[in-house]
Amino acid sequence: MGQKVNPIGLRLGINRTWDSRWFGRKEYGKLLLDDLGLRKFLQKRLTQAGLSRVIIERAAKRTRITLHSARPGVVIGKKGVDIEKLRPIPQYAALAERFFPSGEAPPQDEADFFRRWTRIEAVLKARGVGLIGSSLDVEGEWAIEEIDASGGFAGAVAAAGTSLAVTIHDYGDNE
């Protein structure tokens, strides 16, 4: 008889860690069922995204879910995200004066302009309004997270609320 070893259990602590990171004494069963239901829901809802791992971390009253996806654009969706390619714009100061809030300091260069621009556009897209005819004054609480989009790009993600945790993993070729 061959002795079969679970491949995940074999790798734990060496090159892999737990998929759920939390501790619960009395509510262990409830939290475990919540995790299983959440994983099932995400796998069913995001079948086109190619999810490889769903990591659930719980601390006090906060839950963080990290999704490892082959196609993050499917997970994020079109709304609430803006990524711009950095390019030379000689009139960036005039654009900033026209579109940015009046009390804000002018951008230092084109990269600073695009970083601010993507933050504003991400909020507008999350609100579901366009740039034309809309006020750039944002009502309510919005969490904005800049995406570290190296290689000449600037990006931001926005969501209603006070906290937003974004983790970007780049598994592409580094040529």
Image (cartoon, rainbow, N blue to C red):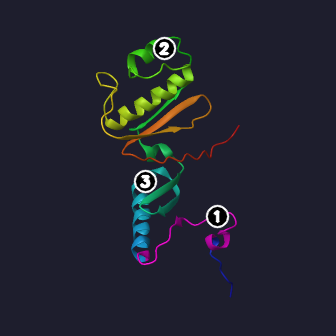
Dot 1 or dot 2, earlier in sequence: 1
Magenta span: 8-28
Front of the two marks 3 and 2: 2
- CA–CA distance between discs 1 and 2? 49 Å
User: The N terminus appears in which quarter of the rendering?
Assistant: bottom right
Disc 2 residue type? Ala
For mark 2, give the secondary structure. Answer: helix
Q: Residues within 10 Å of mark 2 (few under 14, many from 20)?
A: some
Taking the image as shown, residue 152 lies to the left or right of residue 47, namely right
Disc 3 target residue: 46
Image quadrant where residue 135 sits = top left
Residue at (48% x, 19% y) in the render: 106
Q: Residues within 10 Å of mark 3 (few under 14, many from 20)?
A: some
Residue at (69% x, 84% y) in the render: 2
Disc 2 target residue: 93
Taking the image as shown, residue 132 lies to the left or right of residue 63, namely left
